[in-house]
Amino acid sequence: MSENVFRLESVCKSYGSRNVVEIPGCVFTRGLIHGIMGPSGSGKSTLLRLLNMIEKPTAGQIIFRGHDLVTCRPRLSLQRRMAMVFQKPVLFEASVYENVAYGLKVRGLQRADVREKVLEALKTVGLVHLERQPARTLSGGEAQRVAIARAFVTEPEVLLLDEPTSNLDPQNVGMIEDLVRMINRERQTTVILVTHNVFQARRLADHITFMYEGKVVEDGPTEAVFTSPGDDRTRAFIHGDMVY
């Protein structure tokens, strides 16, 4: 039987009188690459921020490996079991090495262990030669690879990716997608990827959650969703016929 990393029950997120996310029920299965896709403004990124506890739901429960993220204390110990990469890389005013090392240092690892893990991560993303370079001088693709290295170096159970390739050229898109596959397969990390790119969703995801106006309107294995969508809105989005 498959394990769930997240289970959502009657989750709602509102800003004032406007509901931006309204999900009666949804699960994310351990070990898969989950693609959350939908048009802009459909609530995809808000859902990701709820999963990572950056925001709290207005109502409902979000269960992470048996823990209710809304009521659990302390929150930090659970939050450290996840890592998130944003659409625009958020890097410190420091070297590439220090950016990747940050999460390990705050967890109290010894200096030698930190260095070993950081260099391994930088080797994985192809940036060992830039370890001393200031992060602010990196190209967009390099910066995003540093952000991903910083995320997976702490060995999270879940990697949350919010449109990680939307501002990148095709070569860097391919590199990032290869990294995501490697992290999922070799490190057994569950990946939840937000994207509006239907081609990327089909290439990467094992399972698709399609959102529209804050609601989940389609949820299932990737090939089933793409070949036999059960909702007209999903079909329109996949075929490029949705106007939004």
Image: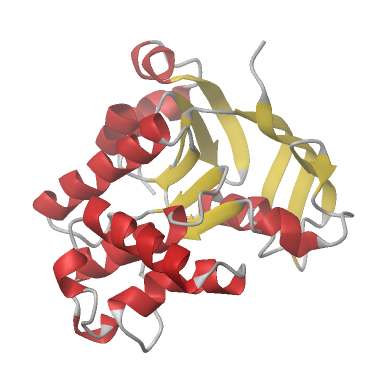
* Residue occupying the point 67% across, 22% down: 3
Q: Is residue 125 above or below residue 140?
A: above
Nearer-the-camera pick, 165 or 238: 165
Give residue 107's quadrant in the image.
Answer: bottom right
User: In this rendering, does residue 231 appear at all?
Assistant: yes
Residue 33 percent coordinates (x, y): 44, 32
Residue 166 percent coordinates (x, y): 28, 56
* Residue occupying the point 23% across, 56% down: 123
Residue 197 percent coordinates (x, y): 30, 42
* Residue occupying the point 47% across, 73% down: 111
Q: Is residue 48 above or below residue 103?
A: above
* Residue occupying the point 18% across, 48% down: 175
Give residue 162's quadrant in the image.
Answer: bottom left
The image quadrant where one finds the N terminus is top right
User: In this rendering, does residue 239 appear at all?
Assistant: no
Residue 47 percent coordinates (x, y): 61, 50
Give left or right: position of 200 versus 113.
Answer: left
